[in-house]
């Protein structure tokens, strides 16, 4: 029988358990750098027994996101303080993965161009991006790769490309956002091209043995959204380009608050069809539900965000035998920029 505390490997990366902190932005950032407070918060998480921490999204280009300060990796000046963060987390035998993102029209920018696949208003912000030229596309792929290399230099155990939740890479996958008629739009094969080429560009720069995780929606659950069948197709393509793990998320507005492990069915079906380790995120709260999913499906890992805000050391509690349900904060509309700015990693 498999357990949540099995020691496993994702390629060469060793994981002390199957439990991860999913990417969670916080407000413990100053001018794009992690503050001492953030390093202490991550130290608490690592002490609390989690096997792998995925950082909140880090900016890969020099844009200025309105509302809040954002972790940044767009040039080498960010490497030294991120190295302090990774060193601290590694002291506890915990892995740390850097999430890379381009927000584009999701939040806009107070400087420079806002780029997107097509000039359609974002359903969240109403912002209309500039349609990316082929040069913009190549340059964006190179920005992801350069950011990944900086992450490697800063001691991260891998990177996660954020291709979920209406960020740029997910916009390319979604027919509503992607109205292109060139080889990056139209069929799912074309819409997946941006993500696949970005993975290849990253691999080329950081080396084939450096872990790349992807976060993706199981389905967009919107009209003109990427469907579940299309997500399965993309995951098969991701397997062909040898990504290391895929985290299955979804539309945060498409589930009933309080529902347990709400993207589990998507994740289980994908895990049964592809040969990449699958992580499921969203509403994971009950130890017994996850243990059953681990043994009854091919899902291998479980990630959590809000539970760590409420109880940073629940993994140790579970490991020590008290497997009662994890507490959770529910700050209505958790994935809004406002709440992301306010929510901090504190009990
Ligand atoms: C405060 C906060 C910040 C978040 N920041 C990110 C982020 O930077 N990147 C990301 O992919 N998801 C982010 N998420 C989403 C979580 O990773 C996760 O997908 C979602 O909260 C569902 O998991 P949960 O039910 O365990 O909270 C954030 C969620 C919260 C609550």
Image (cartoon, helix red, strand yellow):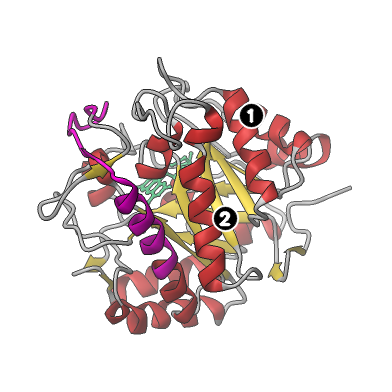
Rendered residue at 50%/79% (across/down): 155
Q: Is residue 28 left or right of residue 64?
A: right
Numbered tag placed on residue 266 in the rendering? 1
In the rendered image, residue 32, in percent from the top left (x then y), is placed at 24, 68
Q: Which residue is mark 2?
A: 213
User: Residue at point 69% right, 34% down?
Assistant: 270
Picture quadrant of ligand 1: top left
Q: Is residue 83 above or below residue 110?
A: below
Res. 105 in view: yes
Q: Nearer the viewer, residue 248 or 52?
A: 248
Point out the stretch of residues depicted in magenta.
120-146
Tell which of 109 and 135 is nearer to you.
Answer: 135
Q: Is residue 249 magenta?
A: no
Residue 29 left/right relative to 306: left
Above or below: residue 129 compared with residue 152? above
- State left or right for residue 341 relative to residue 193: left
Instruction: Place residue 6 in its image quadrant.
Output: bottom right
CA–CA distance in space, label 1 to label 2: 17 Å
- Give above or below for 48 relative to 215: below
Query: What x and y, as percent, mark residue 99?
Result: 44, 58
**Secondary structure of residue under mark 1:** helix
Report if the CB atoms under discs 1 and 2 are less than 8 Å apart.
Answer: no
The local crowd at label 2, few if under 14, some if 14 to 19, many if 20 or more residues have their Cα within 10 Å, is many
**Residue 311 appears in the rendering:** no
Q: Mark 1 or mark 2: which is in front?
A: 2
Q: Residue at x 31, y 32 (%)?
A: 333
Sequence-wise first label, 1 or 2: 2
In the rendered image, which quarter contains the C terminus? bottom left
């Amino acid at each position: 029988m498999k357990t949540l505390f099995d020691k496993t490997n994702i390629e060469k990366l060793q994981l002390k358990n199957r439990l991860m902190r999913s990417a969670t932005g916080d407000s413990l950032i100053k001018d794009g750098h992690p503050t001492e407070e953030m390093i202490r918060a991550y130290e608490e998480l690592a002490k609390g027994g989690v096997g792998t921490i995925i950082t909140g999204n880090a900016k890969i280009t020099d844009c200025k996101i309105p509302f809040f300060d954002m972790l940044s990796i767009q040039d080498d000046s960010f490497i030294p303080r991120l190295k302090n963060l990774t060193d601290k987390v590694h002291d506890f035998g915990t892995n740390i993965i850097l999430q890379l993102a381009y927000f584009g029209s999701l939040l806009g920018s107070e400087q420079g161009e806002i780029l997107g696949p097509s000039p359609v208003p974002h359903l969240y912000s109403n912002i209309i991006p500039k349609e990316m030229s082929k040069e913009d596309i190549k340059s964006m792929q190179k920005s992801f790769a350069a950011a990944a290399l900086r992450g490697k230099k800063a001691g991260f155990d891998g990177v996660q490309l954020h291709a979920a939740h209406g960020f740029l890479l997910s916009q390319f996958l979604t027919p509503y956002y992607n109205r292109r008629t060139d080889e990056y739009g139209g069929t799912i094969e074309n819409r997946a091209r941006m993500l696949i080429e970005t993975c290849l560009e990253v691999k080329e720069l950081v080396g084939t043995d450096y872990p790349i995780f992807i976060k993706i929606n199981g389905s967009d659950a919107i009209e003109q959204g990427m469907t579940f069948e299309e997500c399965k197709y993309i995951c098969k393509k991701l397997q062909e380009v040898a990504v290391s793990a895929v985290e299955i998320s979804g539309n945060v507005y498409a589930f009933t608050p309080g529902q347990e492990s709400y993207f589990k069915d998507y994740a289980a079906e994908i895990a049964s069809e592809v040969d990449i380790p699958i992580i499921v995120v969203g509403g994971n709260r009950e130890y017994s539900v996850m243990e059953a999913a681990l043994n009854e499906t091919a899902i291998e890992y479980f990630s959590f965000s809000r539970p760590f805000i409420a109880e940073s050391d629940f993994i140790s509690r579970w490991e020590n035998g008290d497997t009662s349900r994890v507490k959770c904060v529910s700050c209505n509309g958790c994935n809004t920029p406002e709440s992301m700015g306010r929510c901090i990693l504190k009990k």
